[in-house]
Image (cartoon, rainbow, N blue to C red):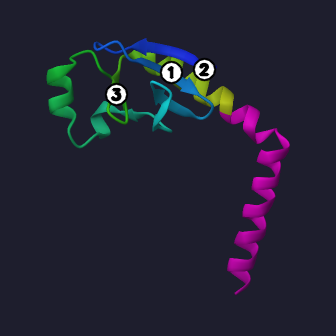
């Protein structure tokens, strides 16, 4: 179960599932990129004039981007406080300590 963001013009559902923005249940992106940072921003704005962010191939309006970012932040917070997230942070700290030692 994910957070619904929008339906594309061709009827596919865009939603946030876990820590990813998905198109029809398949991961499209794990973060939002502001439109002005995208290398092809002019073509995107020509096709979708009200886009403010992109997630992979998906242009998003300000409202859609805010909903997606809120869902991503919520999923990240839940993951970081879970046993799996804590174990991952410990693993990364140990890995960095070993790398710095060598």
Residue that numbered label 1 is attached to = 15
Q: Residue at x 27, y 15 (%)?
A: 50
On the image, the x and y values in percent for residue 87 come to 82, 53
Left or right of 73: which side holds 20? left
Looking at the rendered structure, the secondary structure element under dot 3 is: strand
Residue 45 coordinates in the image, percent (x, y): 20, 24
In screen coordinates, is 98 left or right of 83?
A: left
- Residue 85 on the magenta span: yes
Q: Which residue is mark 2?
A: 2
Residue 20's x, y, as percent?
A: 54, 34
Graded by Cα atoms within 10 Å as few (under 14), some (14 to 19) or many (20 or more), the crowding at tag 3 reads some
Span highlighted in magenta in the image: 76-102
As drawn, 51 above or below 19: above
Q: Residue at x 75, y 32 (%)?
A: 78
| Badge 3 or badge 2: first in the primary sequence | 2
Task: Name the image quarter holding the N terminus.
Answer: top right
Instruction: Look at mark 3 in the image and give the residue it sits on.
Output: 58
Q: Are marks 1 and 3 in contact (CB under 8 Å)?
A: no
The image quadrant that residue 92 belongs to is bottom right
- Nearer the observer: mark 3 or 2; the answer is 2
> Which residue is located at x 77 percent, y 62 percent?
91
- For the residues labelled 1 and 2, the Cα–Cα distance comes to 6 Å
Query: Label 2 crowding class (10 Å Cα cut-off): few <14, some 14-19, many 20+?
Result: some
């Amino acid at each position: 179960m994910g957070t619904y963001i929008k339906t594309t013009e061709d009827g596919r559902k865009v939603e946030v599932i876990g820590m990813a923005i998905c198109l029809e249940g398949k991961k499209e992106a794990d973060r939002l990129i502001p439109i002005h940072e995208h290398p092809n921003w002019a073509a995107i704005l020509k096709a979708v004039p009200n886009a403010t962010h992109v997630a992979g191939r998906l242009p998003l309006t300000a409202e859609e981007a805010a909903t997606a970012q809120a869902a991503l932040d919520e999923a990240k917070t839940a993951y970081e406080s879970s046993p799996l997230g804590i174990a991952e942070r410990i693993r990364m700290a140990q890995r960095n300590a070993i790398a710095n030692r060598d």
